[in-house]
Amino acid sequence: MINEKSCGAVVFTDKDGERLYLLERMRKGHTSICKGHVEAFETEHDTARREIFEETALKVEFVEGFRRTITYSPYDGCMKDVVFFLARAEGTDVRVQPEEVSEVLWLPFERAAAELTHDSDRQTLEAAEKFLNDPSAFRPMRRKKREMDPARALETLKAASSGVLSLLGQGGYPYGVPTSFVYYDGSIFFHGANAGHKLDAARRCDKASFCAVVRDDPVPEQYTTHYRSVIAFGRIREMTGESERRRAIELLAEKYFPGDSREHRDRYIDAEFDGMAMLELRIESLTGKENG
């Protein structure tokens, strides 16, 4: 029995807030995910990276935690393993290898799944989509001894006075904006003008992260810092209902001026209400880290 092995990757990128997958139309007539034979002394990642570059000229970054193997018999007397990883591309510009590839396609998930020739490739694509959409796919913290338990992480978030909201900005550049916020019932609420970069970015892509630091004390003689911080990941949306917007603004006001009278608070909210946008980040993952 002959044993063969190939490696490749489900390659994706985010463009204008939409996830696109890379497919290859091969000269042999089928449409597939990028893969190729393992060469001598290569690691699995080496092979996948090389094949992607040779066939598309794309540079990619592998996403940790995803590995899928399919096994089949390409001909009598041979069994073949194909190992797939998940990789993010820097952009969509490609240069195809004309000897093997006739065309490269960038498609959203449902269209990509319909284009693939083989069920095994389709199942691999489905597994990748599920992995990327699953909140449990968030990377675990590498330095476990610094990790807070969930309750302490939540209390740290509530105690912070401000943080940095990170969104997909114009031209695909990350956009991090310092902002005030309030936490309530699994969500983080932000306010802003009803026009501008922050609102445009939130409308462009609903994936966002938020980082808050409540302690940052350098210890020069030890070349370290005593710190406490949290990072939240989740989906962000513009709040459109009048009552939900009003409640979110009231929560913000109560956080930053808890001793204010109801009459004074309502007067300020009424004056700013029409020109104010409210955003809700529904938390999917919250982790805290501390030292000292």
Image (cartoon, grey):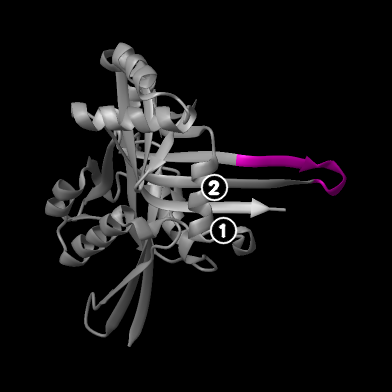
- 165 is within the stretch colored magenta: no
- Point 16% across, 55% down: residue: 116
Q: Tell me, yes or no, if residue 16 can be seen here.
A: no
SS type, badge 2: helix
Q: Amino acid at mark 2?
A: Thr
- Point 14% across, 51% down: residue: 115
Residue 174 position by quadrant:
top left
Q: Nearer the viewer, residue 67 or 118?
A: 67
Residue 232, above or below 173: below
Q: Nearer the viewer, residue 265 or 135?
A: 265
Q: Which residue is mark 1?
A: 148
Q: Which residues are magenta?
A: 214-223
Residue contact between numbered discs 1 and 2, judged by CB atoms under 8 Å: yes
Give the main secondary structure, helix, strand or loop, of the magenta stretch: strand
Residue 182, above or below 132: above
Q: Position of residue 19 (x, y in %)?
A: 28, 42
SS type, badge 1: loop
Q: Position of residue 177 (x, y in %)?
A: 48, 27
Q: Which residue is mark 2?
A: 156
- Relative to 246, is 183 on the left or the right? right
Residue 41 position by quadrant:
bottom right
Q: Nearer the viewer, residue 144 or 137?
A: 144
Q: Tell me, yes or no, if residue 235 can be seen here.
A: yes
Please identify, in this view, whether the residue under mark 1 or under mark 2 is nearer the observer. 2
The N terminus - image quarter:
bottom left
Label 1: how many residues lie within 10 Å, few (<14), some (14-19) or many (20+)?
A: some
